Amino acid sequence: MRFEDILTPRVDKVQLVDRLGVEPNVVGTLHVTTSHIIFRSEEGSKELWIANGLIGSVERGPLSAAGCPLIIRCKHFQVINLLISRDKICQDLYETLLRCSKTVNVCELVAFENRDVAEDARGWSRLDWAVEFTRQGIDSEWGENDLNKGYRSCDTYPERLWLPVAASTTTLMGSCRFRSRGRLPVLTYFYKPNGAAICRCAQPLTGFSARCVEDEKLMELIGKANKNRDTLFLVDTRPMVNAMVNRVQGKGYEDERNYSNTRFHFFDIENIHVMRASQQKLLEACYKCRTMSEYLRTLESSGWLKHLRAIVDCGTFLAQSISRGISCVVHCSDGWDRTAQTVSIAQLLLDPFFRTIHGFQVLIEKDWLGFGHKFDDRCAHIGALNDEAAKEISPIFAQFLDCVHQIMKQRPRAFQFNDRYLIDIHEHVYSCQFGTFIGNCEKDRKDLHIEKRTKSLWTYLDHRQDDYLNPFYEPTTFGVLSGIETRAAAFKVWHALYNRFDDGLLPRETATDMVMTAMEHVGVLESHIAALRIRIAELKCQLGRGGTCCGNSMADSGHSSGTGQSEERLAAIDQRPSSRESGISVSYSEEALTRLPVRWQSLRDASHCTSKSCRAEFASAVDRRIHCHRCGKVFCRRCVRVTADERERICEGCRAIC
């Protein structure tokens, strides 16, 4: 966004209205910049920062005696209700915020405004295709193919593709022409224990009777690449009715009679339009329903939990099939929405690596970014200029994260990361502050020189990795996750995401945060105990040496007795480990050693940063609240620094004392 597009950069005497009507209105100033909208209360106790990319919609309410209502709905589910004193100012602000939310040129997104993009090799090299397939353990039946070099065969696929080595160029090109958008079946996951594989593609261009010998041959080769079992499952994630309707457009689904040793399975996962309407209905239930009966009725009519169940059910079927040694080829319509969801869920269930913080990033890079999920279109990174563009918006990736959350609730010890990790990824998919999720495919990102012009989200998350660790994680216990429950009762609304900013609806201290804080506190106390023991040893040593000097003086005067006992005591003291020899880094000052708190402030009581110069509000229970290791008070991330040895977090006040 350009500065000249901002009609009203500052509005004073704006009232921030509590959505639930519990708290009194907060009067403050609203600032609009090229990257954020910022509300700051007059007394400075409340401050909100919203990235422009997160603005989903802006609505004007009817004029009232209190002022002109303005409602900002954000893509990460924050709703901001404002009251503006004058109608003209409200209209100018409304038009300005609309421009903020509808960037027309992708290069005007805030990610491109970083003037000093540092070299970020680690963030932008999170996925190396060859390294990943080597990690999976692919055998000699599969190999890299240059079919898509320069994106000449399919501009929405990655440039590097892995295919059966027995497939000829003629076979591959024929299949490519027969599949929607040129998205032929290619390898995405190889299961080393039995040689089964997951391949993904788009729907065939069959119409009512067309067939393709090359495509049939490629499917046969995919089946035969599995030396243990040549039966192949072809999984169409769409409802069969939808697939039949697509035949009118010259597309459709495969004729089972033309594909040998292949069994067909349909799953009733609805299209992007149904999912968009479903989430809107879900949000209506979360935000607008005042009674339990109304909430349950609206939630039921949304069908959101039913859709989650269908996706997890399909992913579970794929994982079970692969575990049995049966290779699977998966597609939906174009192979970048439902296909990405289901094959990702299957890999999460099959491979513990993808359940780690790093592995989950690799999975997203591979099956979402690499294989061309249309993030620009689905997340409305570029303003929808017409109805057709608006129809492309759909919460497909958010739905995938919700499915991961549902599985995590069933297997909490199998994942290295916690819910906060998923929620932060969700927010920054939409915020456009990083270049990772900009573009509809790999080719788009290369054309935009994303790696050179923007920062990587993964690097940002790496620096906050301690925020995302799951204290219940048991890395050696879980291999393949079997027995995932897909009954309706197993799926619950993810209120930590959808009601994230509704203070009072969520506990201010989650079980994960409570355990992590307790573990951290115990570690700090143990370090303090070690430091005290070392200090005691040093003081005893000093006392012992002083006693020796005194003893020598007494001996010289003829009054000494028991000098052998003193020497034994000194020898015992000298054998105690010094702080240097013990390997414990003790950075406590004399005052710090005496004032370390045994009890820490409870997270339940922490609504604001303790720092008097900050007092930043913790707007949601998900916001990271950090204890100072020296005083035990709770601070925001900005007000706490890690010591040089990375052993302690200390606030500004305690650092001044050290």
Image (cartoon, rainbow, N blue to C red):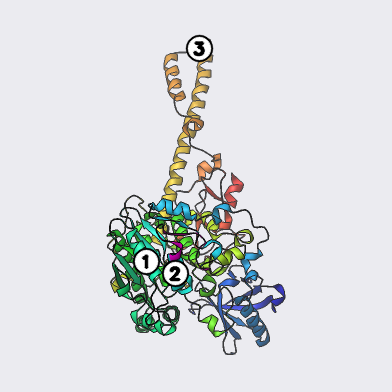
Q: Residue at x 33, y 65 (%)?
A: 318
Q: Earlier in the sequence, mark 1 or mark 3?
A: 1
Q: Is residue 448 visible?
A: yes
Q: Residue 437 at what x, y percent from top left?
A: 54, 66
Give the labeled residue for mark 3: 555
Give the labeled residue for mark 1: 217
Quadrant in which residue 230 is drawn: bottom left
Q: Residues at badges 1 and 2 in contact (C-beta under 8 Å)?
A: yes
Q: Residue 451 at what x, y percent from top left?
A: 60, 59
Quarter holding the N terminus is: bottom right
Work out whether 608 lies above or below 212.
Answer: above
Quadrant in which residue 450 is drawn: bottom right
Q: Earlier in the sequence, mark 1 or mark 2?
A: 2
Q: Tell me the SS state at disc 3.
A: helix
Left or right of 75? Residue 484 is left
Which residue is at the front of the view, 573 or 549? 573
Q: Residues at badges 1 and 3 in contact (C-beta under 8 Å)?
A: no
Q: Residue 276 at what x, y percent from top left?
A: 45, 79
Q: Identity of the amino acid at label 3?
A: Ala
Q: Residue at x 59, y 63 (%)?
A: 446
- Label of residue 174 in the image: 2
Neighbor class of circle 2 (other Cα within 10 Å; few <14, some 14-19, many 20+) is many
Q: Identity of the amino acid at label 2?
A: Gly
Q: Mainly helix, strand or loop, the magenta region?
A: loop
Which residue is at the front of the view, 535 or 276? 276
C-alpha span from label 2 to label 3: 104 Å
Q: Closer to us: mark 1 or mark 3?
A: 1
Q: Is residue 505 visible?
A: no
